[in-house]
Amino acid sequence: MTTEATATTGLSRSLQRLLARTRAFDARRPWLWDSTLTLFWTAAALVDASGGWRNTAPDPSLPAWLVVTLSLGLSLPLYRRRRDPLAALTVMACAALASAASGAFLQAGYLQLIPLFHIALTRPPRALLQAFALLVPPLLTGAVRFPRGSWDQHVVPTLWAYALVALLGIAVRSRKDHTAALVDRARRLEIERDQEVRLAAAAERTRIAREMHDIIGHNLSVITGLADGGRYAAAKNPERAAQALDAIGTTSREALTELRRLLGVLSDDEQAAARDPQPTLADLETLITGVRKAGLPVRFDRGDTSPDHPLTPGAQLTVYRVVQEALTNALKHAGDGAKATVLLTHTPQEVRVEVTNTGPAVPPPPPSGQGQGLTGMRERAALYDGTLDTGPLPTGGWHVRLRLPREGSPS
């Protein structure tokens, strides 16, 4: 960019800032600008009334008081030109009619262009018809009473001036409306972006609450089972009790690790989150081993791993969390002597997971909040167009069946 272009751009920005400050000042104190403009044009009209009006008047013998009165009638109403331009024009048109009928032909009559501009700028189109109905009679009266050559020499040029001012007001109004529409659109877009951010934040909070429920609920259930087993074993088999305490420590550390990873998502440290990936299907063995240590015998049948059709990381996390929640509920509610089975089946079209237990057919308690328990499992399944079916078994016990279609396959 050249020096001249830079200077021009700087000057343009300075002018824009000056105009913005001027508009803001006028919005705070509109009476000041209205008074200044009215006093200026009133002074100009009175200067003309002091003698200059005789240069264009057909009847220069009119009394001074009448000329002064008509000059004030054509200038003082300008103070109301913005708040009520049609009323201001009405008063001025009456003074212009008297000026034309008396033969004064005061040049202050052209001040009617100012309220006409404001009518075109701020009022509906029908107001322009009312304005022209006020402006035409003085023109026709002067042309009829004091003809000068052809009658249209006095009427047509002034009508053209009125029409051009009205068109100017309409053009400025259209520009303002377009600018206002752009500003309104930008404001709506900003509101929509804010709403999207809030919705994303709410979804993230829901996801974090669901993850924390799964992690804390499962690990606390495992720790509770290990603690109960260790308490019974302490009297008869201290070695088994020590093993239970070791397992409690291991489970606690795993829970803390997962919680740190989850809470790390809330920070800006993306590298920390990347060092702790989400659980996958490969972690199911570790999960089931922990449940076995807690006292619930679990049989795991992985079936065909179908390496040619891998699941996405999000879908693998969904399978992991559903199995975790189902086994946690079994630990809590199945009772002594219960057994669980986890069956994982792969096909080219979908993945099925079925978790059953042989305890009493008592459903888990309803979730205390959105995104927890059975509700959380169904939400996870729905994210990947899957289905979740839960309920009692005919022979006693409880089942959880998850079906996830593979990406690109019909659901």
Image (cartoon, rainbow, N blue to C red):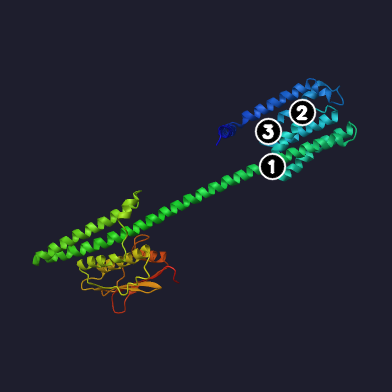
Q: Earlier in the sequence, mark 1 or mark 2?
A: 2
Q: Is label 3 or label 2 in front?
A: 2
Residue drawn at 72 percent across, 25 percent down? 42
Q: Residue furthest front?
A: 2
Q: Give the CA distance from mark 3 to mark 2.
A: 17 Å
What is the x, y in percent for residue 93? 77, 34
Look at discs 1 and 3 and give the one toward the viewer. 1
In this view, which residue lies farthest toward the bottom?
395
Using the rendered view, name the quadrant where residue 145 is placed: top right
In the displayed structure, would residue 215 be above or below residue 147?
Answer: below
Residue 185 sits above or below residue 210 on the image: above
Of the two numbered discs 1 and 2 in the rendering, the one whose residue sits closer to the viewer: 1
Left or right of 168, for residue 244: left
Q: What amino acid type should be assigned to the residue bearing mark 2?
A: Ala
Which residue position holds label 3?
A: 80
**Amino acid type assigned to the residue bearing label 1 in the image:** Ala
Q: Which mark is residue 30?
A: none
Residue hosting label 2: 108
Residue 342 in the image: x percent, y percent?
A: 29, 72
Residue depicted at 21% across the width and 71% down the height: 336
Which quadrant does the N terminus fall into?
top right
Structural distance between the alpha carbons of marks 1 and 2: 25 Å
Name the disc covering residue 171, or none. 1
